[in-house]
Image (spheres, helix red, strand yellow):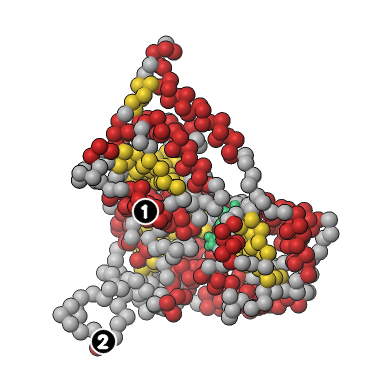
Amino acid sequence: TKTAISELLIDGNVLAAKALARFGIDRMFGVVGIPVTSLANRAVSLGVRFIAFHNEQSAGYAASAYGYLTGRPGVLLTVSGPGCVHGLAGMSNAMANAWPLIMISGSCDQKDFGRGDFQELDQIEAVKPFSKLSVKAKDIREIPDCVFRVIDRAVSGRPGACYLDLPSDVLHQTIHQSEAEKLLEALAENFEKKKKEVTDSVSNSDIEKAVSLLRNAERPLIVFGKGAAFARAENALKNLVEKTGIPFLPTPMGKGLLPDTHELAATAARSLAIGKCDVALVVGARLNWLLHFGEPPKWSKDVKFILVDISKEEIELRKPHLGLVGDAKRVLELINKEIKDDPFCFSKSHPWVESLWKKSKDNVSRMEAQLAKDVVPFNFFTPMRIIRDAILGVGSPAPILVSEGANTMDIGRAVLVQTEPRTRLDAGTWGTMGVGLGYCIAAAVASPDRLVVSVEGDSGFGFSAMEVETLVRYQLAVVVIVFNNGGVYGGDRRNPEEITGPFKDDPAPTSFVPSAGYHTLIEAFGGKGYLAATPEALKAALSESFSARKPAVINVIIDPYAGAESGRLQHKN
Ligand code: ADP
């Protein structure tokens, strides 16, 4: 009967699971154990998919990418102490990339804190540098409100990581089901209201100024990044580019918002585009190291930046000519609306547009000449071309590409083609290595209709190679291609005469076992492994694994002397 149900007691684990499900969480990533195993099981019973990993670091990377791909917070569940510390990798990565994530960790019994309890740690303190908000539920009745706050905060303003601490005594406390329902009900209304809130503060006159700057520019450029991708600004961007004829440049993860093959894409003429533009509309991309801080010599010293960003602090930090604080999609729609009343369009024969187009064409044909050769033993270019063609052959919906490594990522960025939004995940703002497997799992969970293809170095793969078991366990449509050159940057590149001391005969810090059989790792779990050292073998492996849409690892043997140390960032090493 109804009375009987309302008299039922539920514990903190059940209440936390209910609150998460009620506030829209339908996927979780993590590693279970004391005291959160029951929370994961309860969540599953409520219809949440729980993806169980081997390591919280990888689960955290997955949660961060899931947040980016879906626009809703990715949830990472960990145990206390060491589990929470491993999870910091995911939180910090989410913060650096401005992606919404919630880490939920169990913690030790409150009454035993400070006495050396099992897995004891002041977790609220530990997560501080990596979170927008951290809260602890000190009593079971606080759980719904805490869950509500972390979810809300992770996506409001600049997205980022939030933390929820659930002590084991709170998870074991009980309340009546009826009381729990009341607590959740009271918040549900507020939750719906908040979802609809618009917080932009951009004025009409600023929109007019932006349009006038673009209209009067001689060499305008539109730059967009993963913030624009997060805002789902692709249609607004497409309109703007078509209306104005202004060339555009995506950042690495902005690639695909407009197709790389678009005739106004200045990707292949990047240096010229940023070096010579006089007005740059930068949308959802920070003027950080990836964009050379917006400073000379890469940019002209007179360039006028118009920055569109959800974060007021970001605009204040960069001091652009004009800052527009707001959601990328909405701000671009306002700009488009303003242009509509008085349209303008740079023609293809405009000297600026033409110079970029010519430069792109030159650079592309030079690159194609290099790619056309079948070099064996493999350099980076030959297999990359074969992979590019295989990915393009899949058509729409395009595969999600995951990319990490030094040379593998740098060369991949130039060669692999992105045609659809949010189909590229890479080492990102923080240059985080080891994200590959976690990102693959997140992408497959977020977009089950898409194939996921990861192209990564052997070193990136090694960080979390055990997660290939996770791929097999959940039967995810992920093909991991490992560029195996025997180590970081390609194994031992030292001059033997410079190495002395008792350990001089040890393997170099950069080297791994040469010709490692990475493909056999996945076979241990029933997945499919391929070894590919020739174009024929690689083509066959790609063709079979792409059509099977089952977990696979392709071990591509690369000449250890191909590629540069540190890839494109040699000057920093
Ligand atoms: P990239 O690595 O592609 O250059 P960044 O991560 O440096 O991109 O920059 C993304 C920027 O986008 C951040 O400054 C973030 O505040 C901003 N951002 C996030 N969400 C939105 C949004 N909805 N609208 C506009 N800007 C956003």
Compared to 105, does 218 lie above or below?
Answer: below
- Tell me if mark 1 has few (under 14), some (14-19) or many (20+) residues whose alpha carbon lies within 10 angstroms of its own: many
* Residue drawn where x is 36% and y is 24% of the image: 175
- Tell me if mark 2 has few (under 14), some (14-19) or many (20+) residues whose alpha carbon lies within 10 angstroms of its own: few
- Residue 461: give its label: none
Q: Nearer the viewer, mark 2 or mark 1?
A: 1
* Residue drawn where x is 32% and y is 80% of the image: 493
The x, y position of residue 22, in whole percent, is: 48, 32
Quadrant location, ligand no. 1:
bottom right
User: In this figure, which residue is indicated by the disc labeled 1?
Assistant: 88
* Residue drawn where x is 44% and y is 13% of the image: 2
Q: Assess whether mark 1 and mark 2 are in contact (beta carbons under 8 angstroms).
A: no
The quarter of the image holding the C terminus is bottom left
The x, y position of residue 454, in whole percent, is: 44, 59
Callout 2: helix, strand or loop? helix
- Residue 498: give its label: 2
What type is the residue that disc 1 sits on?
Leu
What type is the residue that disc 2 sits on?
Glu
